[in-house]
Image: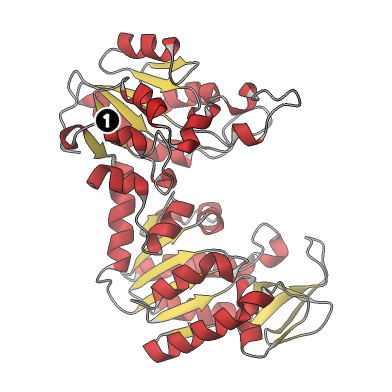
Amino acid sequence: MDINFKDKKALVRVDFNVPLDKEYKITDDTRIREAVPTIRYILDQGGAAILMSHLGRPLSKLNEDGTVNREKFTLKHLVSHLRRKLKARVHFADDCVGKSAVKKAAALKPGEVLLLENTRFYPEEEKGDAEFAGKLAALGDIYVNDAFGTAHRAHASTTIVANYFDKQHKTFGFLMEREIGNASRAMKNPEKPVTCVTGGSKVSDKILLLEKFLDYADNILIGGAMAYTFMMAKRGQVGNSLVEADKIKIAKEFLKKAKAAGVKVLLPRDSVCGDKFAADASVQVFPSNAIPDGWMGLDIGPSAAKAFARTIRASKTVIWNGPMGVFEMPAFAEGTKVVAKACASATRKGAFTMVGGGDSVAAVNQLKLAKKVSFVSTGGGAMLEFLEGKELPGIKAITG
């Protein structure tokens, strides 16, 4: 951020879409903590920060009378926590445009922060409405996008608002810079061998990512329910495991492409199976290509976990996106834990390791390994699309 913020008001798009409990207390403040360096830098430079964010999807969960549930989705719940993290005066505007926002933005002094109300209270936000974006833009002198998690959305506050600032008055925050820099490092000229680990339930969600991995990976490890579609493509018996029957042909084609490209694809040789999709299911381990009827694969098995961990530990670059099993159920969490620990081990040996995707990030956080891997992305869907090679509108709006 090579912009002088002294006596300027920076309009900062942050991603404060944090989880709240029933009492509206923050249960995970990672996204707030990640935004602090950018906000503090602006304040320390003698500027003021006007923060924009969304929280949830308020317009898709209206009250019975058709009104917005403002109490559930208001960003006011975050103010006291933000004050503690920033050690600064934090004001709150009960609107993101209109008289309240304009008046409080105008009165903001250097070193102070104004948090605007949830941008998604307005349908114009997700529609990328230019007039709405213009009202937001009028509140600040400089636009800073530090919300990588929403960079794949062409929304008013993430993308369209940047059109109202010239190149000298718009920039990325430190979090955005780190996200883009680390993902680019993993994809462009990575140190080899490169191992890409992916999981989750559907091949359809990850096939673009898998095909992009063929450009630079030496090994691709596939876990999660999506592995059983690949197992079916190899004529395996997968019992009642989740399979996308209409994606078996795509899985076969991918395996052929990988072979032609000289990329080794590891599927789990065994699986931890349950007799139902439930935390209290009966559990047995079967070969992944010979799961009996009445059983479903819900995690990679112990033999597969060892093979995956061995490959990860022997790598110089590791990208991990997606859990190995139903991580939220303790009986089916071990595979994901083994992969997380292997990533930490590879990092200790000098590898560059990047973790992205909700459940993968949850795993490294729960195991207190977040600081033992090279980089944990806050991006979710944005990181997935970036790794797939897509141009993200929130990034293009700054870089042109």
Q: Residue at x 29, y 22 (%)?
A: 140
Q: Residue at x 68, y 29 (%)?
A: 62
Q: Residue at x 31, y 67 (%)?
A: 187
Q: Residue at x 41, y 67 (%)?
A: 319
Is residue 342 shown to the viewer in this render?
no
Q: Position of residue 12 (x, y in %)?
A: 34, 31
The residue indicated by pointer 1 is 164
* Side of 121 where 279 appears, left or right: right
Q: Amino acid at mark 1?
A: Tyr
Q: Quadrant of residue 354?
A: bottom left
* Side of 88 where 258 appears, left or right: right
Say which of 300 and 196 sits in front: 196
Q: Quadrant of the N terminus?
A: top left
Say which of 291 and 230 sits in front: 230
Say which of 18 and 316 sits in front: 18
Q: Quadrant of residue 386?
A: bottom left
Q: Quadrant of residue 239?
A: bottom right
* Residue 150 higher or lower than 208, as above or below: above
Give the secondary structure at mark 1. Answer: helix
Classed neighbour count for the residue bearing mark 1: other residues with Cα under 10 Å, few (<14), some (14–19), many (≥20): some
